[in-house]
């Protein structure tokens, strides 16, 4: 939870739409919005949903206090009647969606928001800004985790993105399979294990490389990892073992042709009797570089820039669309956008993951005409229901928040990734690993 309002983490047009709806008398019409992606960005074969727990925290603090109202008034963003409405605004609707850590595909209704138009439209920008970034990072992280296999991954991209994005990225990466982060705020807020030893500057601070190694070992013990490529790597390895002994915990490589360098360092360490000393590699890794190191004698990876930028796909491409609303007579109608290449499908959706012998084969989306859920999957199908309640009448399910929510999302992701078909594990650009099938239900 934040200590300030999150209400201005939004676009101006959310408030101008609200003002117009209040004037026209449509602001209190009941509505259903859905958040989904039309396609998987970057030729990915699946997406990983992340950010849900963060979003719930932000919704909890989505209110217009005196400072926010004063700004809106001074900047003439909305009229006096809208300011009066916003003064008492709280989201009192309901939200359901995929569990955090769940896989998604084109059309998956990862978030469903129910409430009045005035309540629900206000959450559009906030929901998209959180889920688009976090899911992009989580999807990239999952691909890296697949490429890494059983080898641990550490997130270390804080210096390559904004300070708030750095914490969000560490959280998303942990959910998708990373084991630790260098970011202490992510550790404090979300309960993620933290790691870190020394940079090249620490070696350069000292007169001799061996002096830097000795100082680090005296502070952190022989189980630490020494950075051995500030100068000459071979000399650095010799110096590290001479100072720490063959029980040194690890060495880190941050430059060079990593498969070749890692093999040479492994042979050198073994020749010095340091057979248990592990090798960590960093140096601008992405999922493709990690895959090329699969046969190299590497024990763990540290990933920065590529992770926090979604490995070239910095957004998940999600959209937030009205799919059902009450008509003037109180009846429910499905509504949809029909623009070329941006069409949406009206009606409330109920989603299932269809499986065959435990392997996912289809994303089945049942579509209702209006408000009521579309029902259940076919009785003869092995279909796992994907949506869970997150907010009920304004009350947030706290089990999805905080460190406990993060660890639950991580465990859920590990389980559902086992359902992926083998073709989904390839890193090359392709279509979705499973099809999305929409079934209209009267």
Image (cartoon, rainbow, N blue to C red):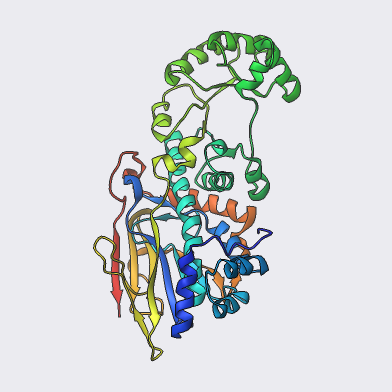
Closer to the camera in the image, 42 or 391: 42
**Residue 196 is drawn in which quadrant?**
top right
Closer to the camera in the image, 172 or 353: 172
- Counting from the top left corner in percent of width and height, residue 154 is at 55, 35
Residue pictured at 52% horizontal, 37% vertical: 160
* In-image side of 431 versus 68 (left or right): left
Q: Is residue 64 visible?
A: no
* In-image side of 229 versus 359 (left or right): right
Outermost residue, bottom side: 329
Quarter of the image that includes the N terminus:
bottom right
Closer to the camera in the image, 217 or 434: 217
Outermost residue, left side: 340
- Counting from the top left corner in percent of width and height, residue 137 is at 47, 46
- Counting from the top left corner in percent of width and height, residue 56 is at 57, 62
Q: Is residue 209 above or below residue 88?
A: above
Q: Is residue 219 visible?
A: yes
Outermost residue, right side: 218
- Counting from the top left corner in percent of width and height, residue 393 is at 57, 76
Quarter of the image that includes the C terminus:
bottom left
């Amino acid at each position: 939870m934040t200590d300030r309002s999150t209400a201005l983490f939004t676009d101006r047009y959310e408030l101008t739409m609200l003002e117009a709806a209040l004037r026209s008398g449509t602001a209190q019409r009941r509505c259903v919005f859905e958040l989904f992606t039309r396609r998987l960005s970057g030729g990915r074969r699946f997406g990983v949903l992340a950010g849900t727990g963060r979003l719930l925290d932000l919704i909890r603090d989505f209110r217009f206090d005196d400072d926010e109202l004063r700004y809106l008034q001074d900047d003439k963003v909305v009229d006096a009647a809208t300011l009066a409405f916003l003064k008492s605004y709280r989201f009192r609707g309901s939200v359901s969606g995929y569990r955090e850590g769940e896989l998604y595909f084109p059309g998956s209704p990862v978030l469903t928001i129910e409430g009045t138009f005035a309540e629900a439209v206000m959450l559009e920008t906030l929901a998209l800004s959180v889920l688009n970034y976090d899911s992009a990072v989580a999807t990239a992280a999952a691909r890296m985790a697949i490429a890494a296999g059983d080898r641990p991954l550490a997130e270390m991209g804080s210096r390559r993105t904004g300070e708030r994005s750095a914490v969000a990225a560490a959280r998303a990466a942990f959910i998708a399979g990373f084991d630790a982060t260098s970011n202490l705020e992510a550790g404090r807020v979300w309960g993620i294990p933290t790691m870190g030893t020394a940079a090249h500057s620490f070696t350069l601070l000292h007169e001799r490389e061996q002096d830097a190694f000795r100082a680090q070992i005296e502070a952190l013990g022989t189980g630490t990892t020494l950075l051995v490529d500030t100068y000459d790597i071979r000399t650095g390895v010799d110096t590290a073992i001479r100072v720490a002994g063959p029980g040194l915990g690890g060495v880190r490589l941050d430059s060079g042709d990593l498969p070749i360098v890692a093999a040479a360092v492994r042979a050198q360490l073994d020749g010095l009797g340091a057979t248990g000393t592990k090798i960590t590699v960093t140096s601008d890794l992405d999922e493709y570089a990690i895959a090329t190191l699969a046969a190299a004698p590497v024990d763990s990876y540290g990933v920065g820039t590529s992770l926090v930028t979604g490995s070239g796909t910095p957004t998940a491409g999600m959209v937030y669309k009205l799919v059902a609303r009450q008509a003037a007579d109180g009846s429910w109608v499905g509504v949809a956008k029909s623009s070329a290449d941006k069409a949406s499908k009206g009606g409330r959706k109920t989603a299932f993951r269809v499986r065959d012998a435990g392997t996912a084969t289809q994303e089945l989306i049942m579509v209702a005409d209006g408000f009521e859920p579309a029902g259940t999957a076919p009785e003869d199908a092995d279909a796992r229901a994907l949506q869970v309640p997150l907010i009920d009448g304004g009350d947030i399910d706290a089990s999805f928040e905080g460190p406990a929510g993060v660890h639950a999302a991580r465990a859920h992701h590990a389980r559902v990734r086992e359902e992926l078909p083998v073709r989904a594990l390839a890193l090359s650009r392709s279509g979705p690993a499973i099809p999305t099938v929409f079934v209209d239900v009267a």
